[in-house]
Image: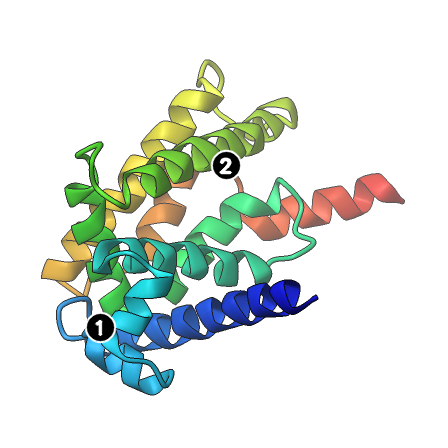
C-alpha cells in the first residue's frame, strides 16, 4: 500500500511540475524558463526536479505533450469533421503563448536527431496527427467537401507542414494571422466553413 501511495504522489508531483513549467514557458519562453525557477515553484531542488525528468529536454518534451492534452480537453466530444476547425482554432489559441511556439519550433528542429530526448514525442505526434487529419479529410471527401482528385493523406501532410511553417514565420512576424491562413488553406482544398458542416449534419439527423 505504501508503495502504491508513493507512486501516486510521484505522478501528482510530475503533473504539478508540468503545469508550472507549461505556464512559465508560455509566459517567459523556452530560454528564460529555467529549471531552477520551475523547481522552486514546486518546492524542489534542481536535482529533485531532474529526479522526475532526466533532463531539461525531456521535461520540455513532456511540457509539449501536456500542452497537447490541455488543447484536446477543450474539444472533448468534437466530431471528426469538427477536428479541422479545431486545428484553426487551436492555432489562434497557441498564438497567445509565444513561449510555447518558440519551444515547439526549437525542439522540433533539435529532436530530428534520434538520440534527442524529444525525438519519440515528435515522431509519435506527427504520426498520430497525420492519421487523425487523414481520417477527417476522408470524411470531408465522402461528404463531397473536398476538391475532386485530392488525396486525404496528402492533404493531412500538407496541413501539418503549413502549421509548422506558419508558426516559424509568426515568430519572425507576429502580425501574421495563422488561424486565418489555415482557414484559407482549407478553403483552397474545397472544405467549407465548420458552420456549414454542422448545419448539414444537423439537417441529416432530423
Residue 151 appears left or right of 55? right
Q: Distance between the residues labelled 1 and 2?
A: 44 Å
Q: Which residue is drawn at 25% across and 60% down?
A: 101
Label at residue 35: 1
129 and 184: which one is in front? 129
Residue 80 appears left or right of 159? right
Residue 122 appears left or right of 99? right
Residue 18 appears left or right of 57? right
Of badges 1 and 2, the one in the foreground is: 1
Q: Residue at x 22, y 60 (%)?
A: 56
Q: Which residue lies furthest to the right in this view?
A: 206
Residue 96 in view (yes/no): no
Q: Residue furthest front?
A: 2
List x then y, in percent, for residue 123. 35, 34
Q: Residue at x 29, y 79 (%)?
A: 39
Residue 88 in view (yes/no): yes
64 and 89: which one is in front? 64
Name the residue beneath numbered marker 2: 191
Q: Is mark 2 on a helix, strand or loop?
A: loop
Q: Is residue 137 above or below residue 94?
A: above
Scheme of colours in the image:
rainbow
Mark 2 crowdedness (10 Å alpha carbons): few <14, some 14-19, many ≥20? many
Whether pointer 1 and pointer 2 mark residues with C-beta atoms closer than 8 Å, the reply is no
Q: Which residue is drawn at 51% across and 27% down?
A: 146
15 and 204: which one is in front? 15
Q: Is residue 146 above or below residue 9?
A: above
28 and 181: which one is in front? 28
List x then y, in percent, for residue 182. 36, 47
Amino acid at each position: 500500500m505504501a508503495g502504491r501511495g508513493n507512486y501516486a504522489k510521484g505522478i501528482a508531483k510530475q503533473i504539478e511540475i508540468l503545469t508550472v513549467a507549461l505556464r512559465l514557458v508560455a509566459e517567459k519562453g523556452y530560454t528564460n524558463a529555467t529549471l531552477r525557477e520551475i523547481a522552486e515553484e514546486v518546492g524542489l531542488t534542481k536535482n529533485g526536479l531532474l529526479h522526475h525528468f532526466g533532463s531539461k529536454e525531456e521535461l520540455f518534451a513532456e511540457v509539449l505533450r501536456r500542452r497537447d492534452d490541455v488543447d484536446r480537453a477543450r474539444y472533448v466530444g468534437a466530431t471528426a469533421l469538427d477536428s479541422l476547425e479545431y486545428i484553426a482554432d487551436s492555432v489562434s489559441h497557441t498564438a497567445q503563448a509565444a513561449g510555447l511556439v518558440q519551444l515547439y519550433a526549437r525542439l522540433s528542429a533539435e529532436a530530428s536527431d534520434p538520440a534527442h530526448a524529444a525525438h519519440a514525442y515528435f515522431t509519435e505526434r506527427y504520426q498520430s496527427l497525420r492519421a487523425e487529419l487523414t481520417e477527417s479529410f476522408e470524411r470531408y471527401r465522402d461528404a463531397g467537401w473536398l476538391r475532386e482528385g485530392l488525396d486525404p493523406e496528402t492533404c493531412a501532410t500538407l496541413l501539418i507542414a503549413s502549421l509548422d511553417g506558419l508558426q516559424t514565420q509568426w515568430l519572425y512576424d507576429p502580425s501574421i494571422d495563422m488561424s486565418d491562413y489555415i482557414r484559407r488553406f482549407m478553403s483552397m482544398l474545397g472544405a467549407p466553413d465548420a458552420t456549414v458542416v454542422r448545419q448539414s449534419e444537423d439537417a441529416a439527423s432530423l
